[in-house]
């Protein structure tokens, strides 16, 4: 059997859902992307989302992922990832391409942006929660 033809994708327009069974499913980004994810993948149990975002200002929310650790990698720019633990904040300074942090499971986190930045995320999306900064 001949392997399926592949073509290049861009994380600017197509994210990837990784399944626990080894699958990798490209998902086009749209204005309804997160609603579409819920319709296509339900609770997102056992899956991770590979995504790319650019930022020119601080995040306006905290987020937390109870299903696992999140990989957060700086591609360009300068960012502090702020982790909240037992009511105290801990900052992880990312200031060079390829610098990353593993955000522990169930840890609230946000980001302070010091220069326009691009970041790569691998997120265990099941049960993700948000709250205002």
Image: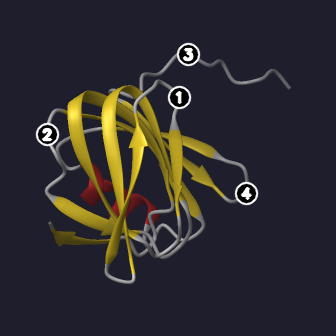
* Circle 3 crowding by C-alpha within 10 Å: few under 14, some 14–19, many from 20: few
Which element type, helix, strand or loop, lies under badge 1?
Answer: loop
Q: Secondary structure at mark 4?
A: loop
Q: Position of residue 96 (x, y in %)?
A: 45, 26
Disc 3 vs disc 2: Cβ atoms closer than 8 Å? no
Residue 78 or residue 66, whichever sits in front? 78
What colouring method underlies this structural image? secondary structure
Q: Which mark is in front, 1 or 3? A: 1
From the viewer's perspective, tell me whether residue 107 is left or right of residue 133.
Answer: right
Give the answer, above or below, for where 32 lies relative to 126. Answer: above
Q: Are marks 1 and 4 in contact (CB under 8 Å)?
A: no
Task: Mark 3 or mark 4: name the one nearer the start of the chain.
Answer: 3
Residue 22 in the image: x percent, y percent?
72, 50
From the image, tell me which residue sits under label 2. 57
Of labels 1 and 2, earlier in sequence is 2
Q: Residues within 10 Å of mark 2 (few under 14, many from 20)?
A: some
Pointer 1 with pointer 3, Cβ within 8 A: no
The residue lying toward the viewer, choosing from 26 and 128, is 128
Q: Nearer the viewer, mark 3 or mark 2?
A: 2
Residue under label 3, please give it.
7
Q: Residue at x 35, y 64 (%)?
A: 38
Q: Disc 4 designates what residue? A: 21
Query: Which residue is found at the position 42% from the left and 22% from the top?
Result: 10
Q: CA distance from mark 1 to mark 3?
A: 25 Å
Q: CA distance from mark 3 to mark 4?
A: 22 Å
Cα–Cα span, label 1 and label 2: 20 Å
Q: Are marks 2 and 4 in contact (CB under 8 Å)?
A: no
- Mark 1, other Cα within 10 Å: few <14 / some 14–19 / many ≥20: some
Q: Position of residue 99 (x, y in %)?
A: 51, 34
């Amino acid at each position: 059997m001949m392997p399926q033809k592949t073509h290049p994708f861009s994380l600017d327009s197509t994210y990837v859902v990784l399944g626990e069974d080894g699958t990798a499913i490209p998902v086009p980004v749209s204005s309804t992307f997160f609603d579409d994810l819920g319709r296509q993948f339900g609770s997102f149990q056992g899956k991770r989302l590979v995504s790319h975002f650019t930022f020119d200002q601080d995040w306006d929310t905290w987020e937390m992922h109870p299903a696992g650790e999140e990989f957060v990698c700086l591609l360009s720019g300068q960012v502090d990832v702020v982790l909240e633990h037992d009511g105290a904040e801990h900052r992880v300074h990312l200031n060079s391409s390829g610098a990353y942090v593993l955000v522990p499971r169930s840890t609230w986190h946000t980001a302070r942006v010091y220069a326009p930045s691009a970041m790569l995320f691998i997120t265990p999306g099941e049960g993700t929660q948000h709250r205002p900064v």
